[in-house]
Amino acid sequence: MNRVVHFEIPAEDPEKITTFFSSVFGWKFSRWGEEAYWLAETGESNEPGINGAVMKRRDPAQPIVNTLNVEDVSECARKLEAAGGEVVVPKMTIPGVGYLIYFKDPEGNIHGAMQSDPQAK
């Protein structure tokens, strides 16, 4: 729990970036859902590392984001705000996956926090 489990790379042209990472590093991509969002399989599951995604950039300043797995996203939000962080995207449901928030740490870096729940609707 509380480990980095996913990353997101924003891009103006996600298909170009998926081609780049595929040809250079051998990553495999599959489109997920109706949005411009491609899941990235970065290696074999028995090797060290994490998987992630490439997404359509939503803001010119949108950074690469690492997402941490947490037990309770609402409790995480309370704790991070008490410690000087700030929730910048409130709790949202990702159906069949869980609940997600995006937050800034005290230095202004953006991260995600994800509570897994396959029953989320």
Image (spheres, grey):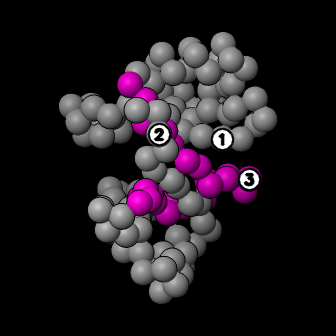
* For discs 2 and 1, the disc positioned in front in the rendered view: 2
Query: Dot 3 corresponds to which residue?
Result: 61
Q: Position of 51 compared to 81: left or right?
A: left
Q: Position of 31 compared to 80: left or right?
A: left
Which quadrant of the view contains residue 114?
top left
Identity of the amino acid at label 1? Ile
Residue sitting farthest toward the left: 119
Query: Dot 2 corresponds to which residue?
Result: 3
Q: Please determine whether, in this image, residue 109 is positioned above or below residue 87.
A: below
Q: Residues within 10 Å of mark 2 (few under 14, many from 20)?
A: few
- Label 2: element kind: loop
Query: Dot 1 corresponds to which residue?
Result: 110
Residue sitting farthest toward the right: 107
At x 43%, y 36%, the residue is 69
Which label number is shown at residue 81?
none
At x 72%, y 56%, the residue is 60
